[in-house]
Image: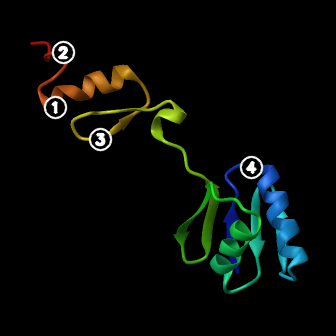
Amino acid sequence: MALVDCAHDGELASELLSYLIKSGHQATLDVDIITINEKNAKNILVSFLKDTKKQDYFILESDTNIFVVAKLASLDQIGFVKCEFCGKAFSNEEKLDSHKIVHGQGMPPVN
């Protein structure tokens, strides 16, 4: 058995469930989580993405039986900013500016 999280994409979840059932696999949908009652779930998901030509989707495996199928997004696409010195990500410019102190940049600490 495997769990597949469709990352809050109801349309993807419905399409995947339909694909699974039409392909003869036992699967159920609860919200956006699909349960596949098969041992080779990753291979099935790879086939789904290939057969439906979803080249912009990826399979992320978080455990041996838990998967996420979603589009990958860059940090700037979701509103995060990144430190140019170390690459650490922050949710806003203020937090980034505070962080830059560790690199000897930004506002000096208050004495």
Q: Is residue 56 above or below residue 102?
A: below
**Disc 1 element:** helix
Q: Position of residue 2 (x, y in %)?
A: 68, 76
Distance in Å between CA atoms under marks 1 and 4 = 39 Å
**Disc 4 element:** loop
Distance in Å between CA atoms under marks 3 and 2 = 19 Å
The chosen color scheme is rainbow
Residue at 54% from the left image edge and 35% from the top image edge: 78
Distance in Å between CA atoms under marks 3 and 4 = 29 Å
**Disc 2 element:** loop
Q: Position of residue 40 (x, y in %)?
A: 66, 85
Q: Which residue is mark 3?
A: 87
Marks 4 and 2: in contact by CB < 8 Å? no
Q: Which residue is mark 4?
A: 9
Who comes first in sequence, dot 2 or dot 4? Answer: 4
Marks 4 and 3: in contact by CB < 8 Å? no
Looking at this view, is 82 or 8 the one in front?
Answer: 82
Label 1: few (<14), some (14–19) or many (≥20) C-alpha neighbours in 10 Å: few
Q: Position of residue 61 (x, y in %)?
A: 54, 68
The residue type indicated by label 2 comes to: Met
| Quadrant of the rendering where the C terminus is positioned | top left
Q: Which residue is mark 2?
A: 107
